Amino acid sequence: MKTFDPQAMYSEWMSQLVNQNNWQDSLKSAAVWNQMPAGGAGPLSATGDMLKELGVQVDPATMTRLQTEYMQELGKLWMDFSVSKLPDLKDRRFAAPDWHNHAMHSYSAASYLLNARFLMAMAESVQAPAKTKQKIGFAVQQMIDAMSPANFLVTNPEAQTKLIESKGESLAKGITQMLADMQKGRISQTDESAFEVGKNVATSQGTVVFENHLFQLIQYTPVTKTVHQRPLLMVPPCINKFYILDLQPENSVVHYAVEQGHTVFLVSWANPDESMAQVTWDDYIEDGAVQAIKVVQKISKQDKINAFGFCVGGTIISTALSVLAARGEHPASSLTLLTTLLDFSHTGVLDVFVDEMQVNMREQTIGRGGLLPGRDLASTFSSLRANDLVWNYVQSNYLKGEAPPPFDLLYWNADSTNLPGPMFCWYLRNTYLENKLKQPGALTVAGNQVDLGKIDAPCFIYGSREDHIVPWPAAYASTSLLNPRHKSKNRFVLGASGHIAGVVNPPAKKKRSYWTNEKTGLDAESWFAGATETPGSWWPQWAAFLSEHGGKMVKAPSQPGNAEFKAIEAAPGRYVKVRAD
């Protein structure tokens, strides 16, 4: 998986800043538009070089049309500038008064937006296969985002004003913060000193009742006198820390489930070090999810449990339940999947990082042993929203010398986890690249053939409408793989917002909305066309589903664990506190 290095890109574009005027001049040249020679300046040259290397081109008629339209809009912009008519800048990067109060800065921003729009139009017009075209569009967008005049001190009037007002202090502080981030190997997005795991994040009361080399199992303390007979086992993604589900009491999915009268168990994955360099996907299934299910069954004395998976955790728990089904075991009373991929046909923008060459490269380097550093994954995910998660902080932290404010979600986002190389490479090839998980019998995991259709449990499947990691139609596709002969057992709910904000949406906030439609045998577009939108959080819908499959109410357990699985330490445990950096 090719990673995105913001510091390297920032340095590269800083060195090319002097060529910004040449970028605009290049776009005026018919020769450049039609031949796109190497050796020109700025992003147009880079785009041309990239297209030549990939062996693709733009239809000459389309190129001529783009050039004509560009020259018309550029001419209008020049005319407005000559009569001191300031352009209407609607891009939020240029919302500050400093961009509107000075004609040169206003024109600089408008020229950038014009050039950016036509570079993307050129990328979208290339004659190439869909995946190649997607990669070109992604690369050009990264380049465009990096070249924004807001990213450079000499073209950012906000940073210049602050430099003058602070008598140089903002620049000195910005350089100090940049040097500190270079030591860390990542851009600071929040004041990390303001948070401590177990102190003001991941604070739900509970006890670690089991641990092995892969995970700790937390049993949370009940807050109701009675609880549902069947416990809830939550499996979060192993590519992040679990406490995205337990940030603060008021937005904690864990705390909400406990309040609804469930005995909640949660898998807290180990943050791999070199001792786990040989761990495989089979290990995560057998020694991870399957082991967690067995322990929860023994502690609760229940054959049936409510299973829950979020993101990759959903892929893991679904695979584990399929493996158990092949062994003749059906431990799930219900299955909840939040923003989970089981069918990897449409993986959105992440698809640009996955092809045979890149997967093979990873297999050669870490497939037989080693670690994928957490910072690599973090950089990849940041690149998906570079303006928000990279350049926004370049501007505020470095150019303006502002310290990032405390924000628990961004603290969690920076708390990366490593992954074992063999496990990661298996996952990358068999899901994202070859999409075998959805094919009955195509994969053998932990000694058993995987057939998701053999999982015998009603399913609550959730997707987020603006999710860029798990596009909601891809989440919806699970309704065709699970309970294929009894699709009425599947329920799909679509929430507003993105991968994280859509999931972490407590009812008390009264924010956003969600869509429901009982007919899940339809394709995604037809499902949505017939769906009903309801204001507020989808959590109560999930609570009702869990209650339906939770069994009768019984007295809440007075102590965690049992005689075999005794208390080890208080939640959140040791494993979640191990940092990748």
Image: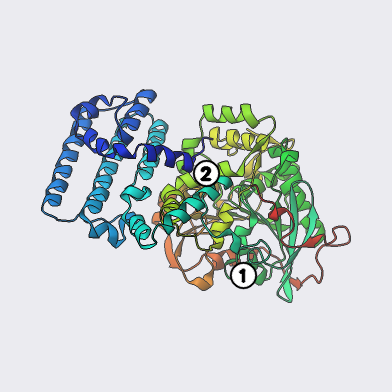
State the residue in front, 418 or 137: 418
* Residue furthest to the right: 563
Residue at 35% x, 59% y: name it: 164
Q: Residue furthest bottom?
A: 225
Disc 1 is placed on an element classified as: helix
Q: Nearer the viewer, residue 412 or 80?
A: 80
Residue at image mark 2: 379
At 44% from the left edge and 67% from the top edge, which residue is drawn? 534
Tell me the kind of residue under disc 2: Ser
Picture quarter containing residue 136? top left
Is 85 situated above or below 539?
above
In the rendered structure, the answer to whether residue 416 lies left or right of residue 472 reads right
Question: What is the C-alpha distance between the residues marked 1 and 2?
Answer: 29 Å
For image coordinates 46% across by 45% down, the residue present is 384
Q: Give the residue pinned by disc 1.
A: 249
Where residue 216 sits: x, y (%)?
A: 75, 54
Could you tell me which secondary element the residue under label 2 belongs to?
A: helix
Q: Is residue 452 left or right of residue 212?
A: left
